[in-house]
Amino acid sequence: MSDRTASGTARVASGCYCAMRMVQGEGGAHMLDVGQDQAPGSAASRRGDLAGTIRDEAAGYAEKRKADAARIVSDVAEAIRASGSGFSEQPNVKAFFDEAAEGIAEFSEGIAHRTFSELYDEVDAAVRRRPGVTVAAAALAGFALVRWFRASGIRPIPRSRAVVSADVFPTPEV
């Protein structure tokens, strides 16, 4: 009652390689599929490596931006705290600035300690809870961006203040 075993790989129609084992026993020879894997240099293997590399790079980039956001929010908290120190004669106003700075500092710590996916899930949940507030915030942000872009654009100089006389650059008659 002895079994003989032979192992090897075979390429199947899908392009993957299957590890096969030939078992010779009393009932005859049987071919067993012991695993399916991709060949080390195949296109599917390289595609998987590329996707993993891109995913790792994106995760690293997101973590860096998250750390930058936490630092910026922390800097805002410090600026509020510093501006509140000028109100030492008015304890009520100083306490208001200190509480606001403390709340923003806690928000900064929350950003720093959460993962990017946790932050995304929280924002997604907030958007789903209050879609009206989300639309209003998006409209306000869009309005502010349009105003900012228009303000930073090049404006024409009125002819009354032009350094070059109007005769140098004649305007076409319309």
Image (tube, rainbow, N blue to C red):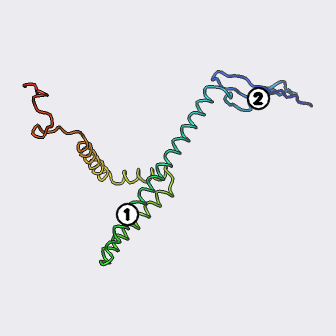
Q: Does label 1 or label 2 sit earlier along the sequence?
A: 2
Residue at the (12%, 39%) spot, across then down: 158
Find residue 9 and report its horizontal and vertical position in percent: 75, 25
Marks 1 and 2, how far apart in space? 70 Å
Between circles 1 and 2, the one closer to the viewer is 1
Q: Write down the residue under mark 2.
A: 32
Pointer 1 residue: 79
Q: Is residue 97 left or right of residue 35?
A: left
Name the residue rendered at 83%, 26% in the picture.
6
SS for dot 1: helix
- The residue lying toward the viewer, choosing from 39 and 78, is 78
> Quadrant of residue 11 in the image?
top right
Whether 111 is drawn above or below 41: the answer is: below
Looking at this rendering, what residue extends furthest in the right direction? Answer: 1
Residue lying at the far left of the rendered structure: 173
Q: Amino acid at mark 2?
A: Leu
Q: Is residue 5 left or right of residue 68?
A: right
Q: State left or right for residue 115 relative to residue 133.
A: right
Q: Nearer the viewer, residue 75 or 58?
A: 75
Under circle 2, the secondary element is strand
| Whole-percent x, y for residue 78 in the image | 40, 64
Residue count near mark 1 (Cα–Cα under 10 Å), binned few <14, some 14–19, many ≥20: some
- The residue drawn where x is 12% and y is 40% is 161
Residue type, mark 1 in image: Ala
* Quarter of the image where the N terminus is located: top right
